[in-house]
Image (spheres, rainbow, N blue to C red):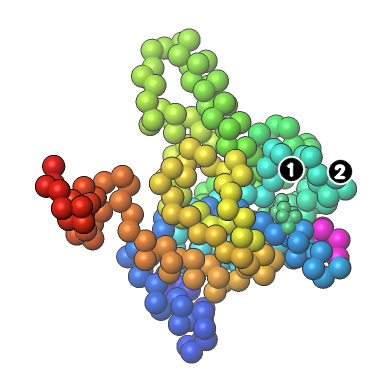
Amino acid sequence: MQALLDALKPGQEDDTLARAIDPQRLPGHIAIIMDGNGRWAKRRGQLRVAGHKAGMRSVRTVIETCAQLGLNALTLYAFSIENWKRPRTEVEMLWRLLRTYMRLELPELMRQNIRLHAIGRLEALPPQVNGDLKEAMAHTSGNTGLQVNLAINYGGRAEIVDAVKALVEESRKRHIEIDETMISAHLYTAGIPDPDLLIRTSGEMRVSNFLLWQIAYAELYVTETLWPDFTRGDLLRAILDYQKRDRRFGGLGANGRPPVDERFSETLGIPAR
Ligand code: FPP
């Protein structure tokens, strides 16, 4: 958190936002559905790929800010299994951008002590993309700061299918008790705590097959802002909004509110159970 405050100029809007954040209640893990690149480009009369290119700037800003805040994990939805339905030229441009990103950003990721991890059906990616990802992961594997998960050729249902297949395979060799912990341990995100906050840009109210298992208790934040326009200030605003939420995880919460049936009984005039 201090690293972020040190990077900001006093009086700047982002500085005011950052100072309003409670460092004790930061989300440990933020997941983002980066949406709206195509619309951003279209509004400017440009090709969709120009939107993806501009979206890389937001990727950089968000990664840097999460690292400065001292968060544990950031998961970015970069390419879904369904995205193969897009025109071949757009898909190829996305691979090119991803490879460029890794080549240009690696020194910066090292400087910021960031560990890069790709999640998804990576074996189905073009070999060079897969190779570059593996190299970047190996290169940053010793870093101990923020873990950035890039979801690439990712689908939440496919992830659950892959976990079930691995469990069935394992159960052939030894007896295993199948419970929630066991399933979590076989997802691509094994060992990474679930996201606390899921952000989606461009106003769409969908989760689009993203981290279906892991977002069970995530707080959702949807902004109309298109991904290429998403700034550090937007991220800080999302975190401030998250800090206003009352997270009860199906229980009664920590803010002293009476249990739901007691509140109902007050209004309905019936005795509480
Ligand atoms: C969704 O916008 C965005 C994507 C499918 C790709 C995201 C890619 C980037 C942000 C750039 C590269 C990423 C990394 C990690 C280096 P959309 O195309 O669906 O927009 P639309 O809904 O307006 O058409």
Within 8 Å: ligand 1 and the Cβ of disc 1? yes
Magenta-colored span: 46-50
Sort mark 2 into few (<14), some (14-19) or many (20+) by Cα contacts within 10 Å. few
Residue 16 percent location from the top left of the image: 45, 82
* Residue 170, above or below 162: above
- Quarter of the figure with the N terminus: bottom left
Q: Indicate the quadrant where residue 209 lies.
A: top right
Mark 2 element type: helix
Q: Residue at x 79, y 40 (%)?
A: 85
- Residue 57 location, quadrant: bottom right
What amino acid is labelled 2 in the image?
Arg
Q: Is residue 261 left or right of residue 71?
A: left
User: Identity of the amino acid at label 1?
Assistant: Asn
Q: State the residue lying farthest toward the bottom.
A: 11
**Which SS does the magenta portion mostly show?**
helix
Ligand 1 is in which quadrant of the figure? bottom right
**62 is higher (above) or lower (below) than 220:** below
Q: Is residue 107 visible?
A: no
Q: Is residue 199 visible?
A: yes
Q: Which mark is residue 88?
A: 2
According to the picture, the residue beneath numbered tag 1 turns out to be 83
Q: Earlier in the sequence, mark 1 or mark 2?
A: 1
> Which residue occupies the foreground of this view, 72 or 34?
34
What residue appears at the point 11 percent right and 47 percent down from the top-left corner?
271
Is 47 within the magenta? yes
Image coordinates for residue 83, horizontal then vertical, percent: 74, 43
